């Protein structure tokens, strides 16, 4: 009898002690859930490496002084059904709780970085921006154009104008190939959509012709609102068999020889892109056209204009006849035209 009572007392004490200890553990876990991770400063970027598990992440956070109880973190993951973590960079703000951080790494809510393709950029400028970004994984290095075309799986043989100007968000270590494929897909989608709804009687045989025109419109436009009028002028010239006579194509054909000014001899030097010496469109785009430029090229203003001259404020005066154009040149650029004719080494008068 005495021994039985003693055993029951020992069991009762053990149960009491376990209950008391379990209470402390539960209280500690509950406090762990409510307290933010130990972040110093405004934000910390934490990288989950390939092959990492919830356990390795938890103890790595402890090693970095960000988490006091890594086992609580693994318990939390089990309770939430989070079985794995996703590779990438994650932002830890000062008030982030362990539960919020677990949600990020288990659902792949990685930091998104941005890169903007600027309207009118050439592929050389796009490629330079990719190399300088820091979060883009460069794989193309000094690959030739034909190798890049092959890597991207493009049907076209030239890269110019094939990537839509926009701001793109992406996680760290996105490859340059993946970025360019995405920008090309965006360009192609908009080009096909605009082509499907294009105006009638346009002098283009293919969507690529329209892309070439859009690139010219992009480089010729100082005021965005004038894009349809600029496109209308060039469409009218193509329809009538006139030369486009647009300086940006000459500049593109000059390549590294262009030093900031176009001389008379440059206008007379024939290249595949010199629209003063050759009729029709140049062989490829000369820059990356914006969506607005694509829309203008495929929905130009049909006002009958064939000429335009810079007014000096970023806009142009548009004319239907050569006589009207000559008057506009005298009105807006008399001094510049006089300087040009008296000294052939000065820049062109920027009339079309």
Image: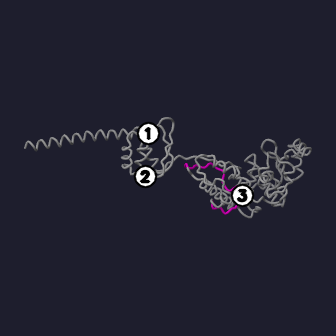
Magenta segment includes 169: yes
| Alpha-carbon span between mark 2 and mark 3 | 46 Å
Task: Measuring from the top left, give residue 246's x and y in whole percent.
Answer: 81, 52
Magenta segment includes 183: no
Identify the residue at image location x=70%, y=55%: 161
Tell me where residue 207 sits by quadrant: bottom right
Q: Looking at the image, which is closer to me, 28 or 50?
A: 50
Q: Looking at the image, which is closer to me, 314 or 59?
A: 59
Above or below, 326 relative to 20: below
User: Magenta-highlighted stretch: main secondary structure?
Assistant: loop
Identify the residue at image location x=83%, y=54%: 245
- The residue tagged 3 is 211
Q: Looking at the image, which is closer to me, 119 or 298?
A: 119
Q: Which mark is residue 84?
A: 2
Say which element carries label 2: loop
Q: Residue furthest bottom?
A: 205
Left or right: residue 150 versus residue 266 is left
């Amino acid at each position: 009898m005495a021994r039985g009572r003693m055993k029951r007392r020992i069991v009762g004490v053990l149960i009491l002690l376990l209950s008391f200890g379990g209470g402390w553990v539960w209280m500690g876990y509950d406090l762990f859930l409510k307290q933010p991770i130990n972040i110093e400063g405004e934000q910390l970027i934490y990288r989950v490496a390939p092959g990492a598990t919830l356990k390795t992440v938890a103890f790595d956070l402890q090693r970095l002084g960000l988490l006091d109880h890594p086992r609580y973190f693994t318990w939390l993951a089990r309770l939430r059904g989070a079985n794995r973590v996703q590779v990438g960079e994650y932002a830890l703000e000062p008030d982030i709780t362990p539960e919020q951080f677990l949600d990020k790494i288990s659902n792949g809510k990685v930091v998104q970085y941005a890169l903007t393709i600027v309207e009118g950029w050439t592929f050389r400028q796009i490629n330079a921006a990719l190399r300088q970004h820091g979060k883009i994984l460069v794989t193309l290095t000094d690959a030739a154009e034909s190798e890049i075309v092959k890597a991207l799986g493009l049907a076209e043989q030239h890269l110019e104008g094939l990537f839509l100007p926009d701001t793109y968000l992406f996680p760290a270590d996105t490859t340059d190939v993946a970025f360019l494929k995405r920008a090309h897909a965006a360009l192609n989608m908009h080009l096909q959509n605009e082509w499907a709804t294009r105006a009638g009687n346009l002098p283009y045989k293919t969507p690529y012709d329209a892309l070439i025109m859009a690139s010219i419109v992009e480089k010729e436009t100082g005021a965005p609102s004038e894009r349809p009028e600029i496109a209308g002028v060039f469409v009218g010239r193509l329809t009538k068999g006139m030369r486009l006579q647009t300086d940006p194509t000459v500049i593109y054909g000059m390549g590294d020889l262009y030093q900031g000014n176009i001389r008379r001899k440059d206008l007379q030097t024939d290249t595949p892109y010199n629209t003063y010496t050759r009729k029709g469109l140049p062989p490829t785009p000369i820059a990356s056209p914006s969506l607005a430029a694509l829309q203008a090229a495929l929905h130009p203003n049909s006002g009958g204009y064939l000429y335009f001259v810079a007014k000096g404020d970023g806009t142009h005066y548009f004319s239907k006849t050569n006589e009207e154009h000559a008057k506009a040149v005298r009105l807006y650029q008399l001094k510049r035209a006089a300087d040009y004719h008296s000294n052939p080494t000065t820049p062109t008068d920027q009339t079309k």
